[in-house]
Amino acid sequence: MTTTLEEFRDDVDLYSADLSRWPTEKVKPALALMEGEAASKDYFDAARAAEDELRAYDPQPADTAALEARIMAAVQADPAQEEPGAGMDFAAHLAAQETAKIATRNDDAARTTTVKWRAAWLFAPGGGLLAAAILGFIIGVLPHRASSDYLVDPGYYAQDQIVNSDSDLLNDGGIF
């Protein structure tokens, strides 16, 4: 089994530069090719160096404490997180909340009184139904072309369906 340089490169990419991972029938031809051709030996050495570099890589552990501290600082600096009555006594806090509720109700009431009704809001949904009804009526009223070549014509099927026996189908040119 002779191995070409292209097949050798494919095998190195597929099985790695560790010959113990290769199929046993491919190891001897690969070693013979590396002894005979310098290009195959250079490719194998470059693949082994790349794999050794990848195995030696040791990623640094992530500093989760610093990340947590940054996130918590951003959350605490957000003004939306502060309570409206922070720093007040309980009674003052309740009074501030009640004032905020009344202001919200007044804003909602002001918004609802400014809404103006339009006639189009009442007729727009029914407009589509009305258009469909008119179109259906027009299609139903239009005259249709009278023709006897429709497949649903009873006379068309009546002639073909009258069969006295199976011999009529065979002898008279029925289905055969």
Image (tube, grey):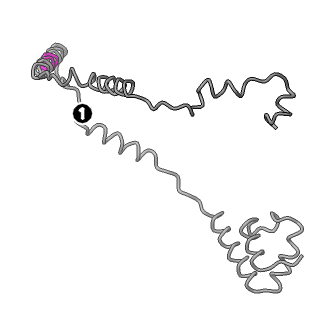
Number of dots carrying numbers: 1
**Residue on which the image places disc 1:** 80
Mark 1: secondary structure:
helix
The image quadrant of residue 127 is: top left
Query: Residue at the location (14% across, 23% down)?
Result: 118
Query: Residue at the location (55% across, 31% down)?
Result: 148
* 154, above or below 149, in the image: above
Q: Amino acid at mark 1?
A: Ala
Query: Residue at the location (43% across, 44% down)?
Result: 65
Q: Give percent across and percent down for residue 141.
A: 36, 24
Q: Main secondary structure of the magenta part?
A: helix
Q: Give percent across and percent down for residue 28.
A: 88, 74
Answer with left or right where residue 110 lies relative to residue 160.
Answer: left
Please identify the residue farthest to the front as the structure is shown. Answer: 172
* 28, above or below 93, in the image: below
Quadrant occupied by the C terminus: top right
In front of the other: 63 or 11: 11
Mark 1 closeness class: few <14, some 14–19, many ≥20 residues within 10 Å: few
Q: Give percent across and percent down for residue 134.
A: 31, 25
Answer with left or right where residue 148 lies relative to residue 90.
Answer: right
Q: Give percent across and percent down for residue 162.
A: 74, 23
Which span is picked out in magenta? 99-105
| Residue 175 lies in the magenta stretch | no
In front of the other: 104 or 161: 161
The image quadrant of residue 142 is: top left
Quadrant occupied by the N terminus: bottom right
